[in-house]
Image: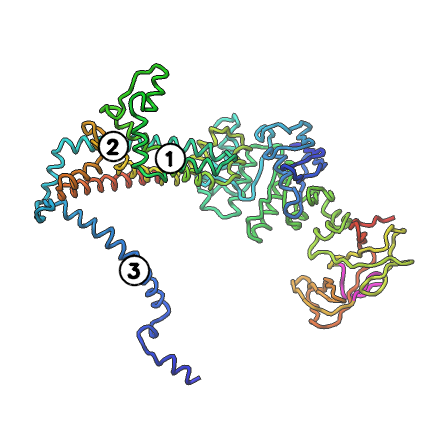
Amino acid sequence: MATIAQREAAPGGLWSRMSLGQKQVMWAWGFLAVPLIFYAVIRFWPTFQAFYLSVTDWTITRPASFVGLENYKRLLADPLFWQVFRNTFMYLILGTPISLGISFVVAYYLDRVRFMHAFIRALYFLPFLTTAAAMAWVWRWFYQPVPIGVINDFLASFGIPQQPFLRSTTQALPAVLAPAVWAGLGFQIIIFLAGLRAIPVTYYEAARIDGLSEGAILRKITLPLLKPTLVFLVVFSSIGFLRIFDQVYNINSNDPGGPLNSTKPLVLMIYQTAFSSYEMGYAAAQTVVLFMILLVISLVQLRIMRDR
Amino acid sequence: MATIELDRLVKRYGQTTVVHGIDLSIQDGEFVVLVGPSGCGKSTTLRMIAGLEEISGGEIRIDGRVVNNLQPKDRNIAMVFQNYAIYPHMSVAENIAFGLYRSKLTKDEKRRRVEQAAETLGLSQLLERRPSALSGGQRQRVAIGRAMVRDPAAFLFDEPLSNLDAQLRTQMRIEIKRLHHRLGTTSVFVTHDQVEAMTMADRIVVMRDGHILQVGTPLDLYEKPVDVFTARFIGSPTMNLMPASLREGGAELSLGGTIEVPRSSPKTSDILVGVRPQDLVPTAGARGLSVTGTVAVVETLGSETFVHIENSGQTIIGSAPGRQIPRIGDKLTLHAPAERLYYFDKVTEKALTAP
């Protein structure tokens, strides 16, 4: 006995003198340290760096010097910014409801399909796996005039006049948006399906016994119970459309954001300011504005949808 | 209020038949319990009555009207589910009022009905609460309330007490029974718990593998089980069964000893002698069954004591008065009077009918 007690006391180090609770805390922080350091270095530090850069006039060729809110003033006075701002919100306002509407309808009916269910689901998910660049190239080909473009070919066969699509200032934005909506559908359908599956079957059976019609079941039971899923998808897809870039950049590669900036979103403007004009300070200010927009919209959506 | 008749009712899923043409006639105002092990077809039968499962063969008549092809809503029945199926996004009052969704009553009349149902079920104080703020028993009462407000022809209960803890289950059992007495609505109750069946039913329907084995009052089933399955399913602890072979003037138990068999010439010689633990006691009777064995396990319940004795590798359960606790390892002889014994054919497992 005495020897064992001696041996246990012998190391006498800091670790052996700690209580069980303290040891658990040490372990917990030990494991947490890995993601914490990762986040600090990879996420938070660049974010703060961007905030700092937005009040400087750094342009790569000359060192950064503090200019106060000069970049923000310039941004507010820039007509291109307001054009881009409008475009970005058009992507959001059109993209989110259209994509959620389509994906809900598909998920709602696909949920009842037993025949080749997994296969059909996989088909819908496929565009989500494809690179935006390849997708944009294919869609650009769709939009070409006859005899190359599939869509114009189709329209022509019904005697409908040719549409300019990507070359029109009014049609270009919806034309760019379409592949973006299409590409996101698979993901949203999968999430909606999971949400639908999580609703217990007995809720529907009880409703059938109480005599609710299909429409009433959808309105009174399915949609309210799907709310958490809906909140997630609204926020997620809004952020996606506010940050739209690769679809736009690739579909019109000789004039990204054109024609006449009619499809240019904020992220593309940031990209061009930073990597074509090398005005890093100005680009950082635009980034901060985008960050604020995303933050405000997400918070507002969460608040509205939670309280209802 | 209504009668329910099942006529050669069949349910098939593809090649598998799960309900094999059962017949059952439920009287107006009766409380019938379908009981059996899981997979016996009791829930499927209930769901066919509700209209949630299609009927593969035979007929269901509610109040004489064939309902085979009627939608659930047109059958005027109400159902209470095991997981309550009350909606988490609605208050208690809204949930109960949901039962009246299709009715053409005025708003005031609906509210009056909801309040009345809440009153009956003791939910008046909880009407504005959300289900998440209720206990399991209260949630089940809300589900019953939703079923009640519509004043349906019949209540269907699909294992409604299985999600409750033991104490609540006993309490809800009494509440449902009392409610049935007050409303007098025809009720069909599905459970796998024989105690629920015994305590609640006017008549019990014992099912196994898609067949009805026996229909009768709880006491009928306890006293006159038609086969080994029912005999062992009803009553707790389960009935002891001892192999025996028929001889001239009696039966010889494989455990040793002979007993008189007051029956006329059964066709087989191999039989099973059954005795309920409650009838097998340490006090000697004039004639009947005597079993001796070594005490292996003693279950003290306070009101009585169950004694497991072992003899030739077979365990027999008997009972002793509450304060008389035998010691483990002791030799003990238990007796049962002859009129409390059951006899079954060992091969067919059917009860041997009295002459």
> Crowdedness of circle 3 by 10 Å Cα count: few (<14), some, many (20+)?
few
Q: Give the residue pinned by disc 3.
A: A33
> Which residue appears at 56% of the width and 41% of the height?
B81
> Does residue B340 appear anywhere in the picture?
no
Secondary element under disc 2, as helix, strand or loop, is helix
Q: Give the residue pinned by disc 2.
A: A89
Real-space CA distance between mark 1 and mark 3, rounded to the nearest whole angstrom:
37 Å
Q: Is the magenta stretch mostly helix, strand or loop?
A: loop
Location of residue A263 in the rendering, given as x and y in whole percent from the top left corner: 23, 30
> Crowdedness of circle 1 by 10 Å Cα count: few (<14), some, many (20+)?
many
Which colouring convention does the figure follow? rainbow
Amino acid carrying label 2: it is Phe
> Which residue appears at 21% of the width and 33% of the height?
A256
> Which residue appears at 82% of the width and 63% of the height?
B285
Mark found first going from the N terminus, 2 or 3:
3
Tags 1 and 3 both on a single chain: yes
In the rendered view, tell whether residue B193 sits above or below residue B46. Answer: below
Real-space CA distance between mark 2 and mark 3, rounded to the nearest whole angstrom:
39 Å
In the picture, the disc for residue A295 is: none
* Residue B283: in magenta span: yes
Q: Mark 2 against mark 1, which lies toward the viewer?
A: 1
Location of residue A200 in the rendering, given as x and y in whole percent from the top left corner: 50, 41
Mark found first going from the N terminus, 1 or 3:
3
Secondary element under disc 1, as helix, strand or loop, is helix
What is the tally of numbered marks visible in this picture?
3
Amino acid carrying label 1: it is Leu
Q: Quadrant of residue B153?
A: top right
Read off the magenta span. B279-291
Mark found first going from the N terminus, 2 or 1:
2
Q: Give the residue pinned by disc 1.
A: A185
Closer-to-camera residue (A227/B140): A227
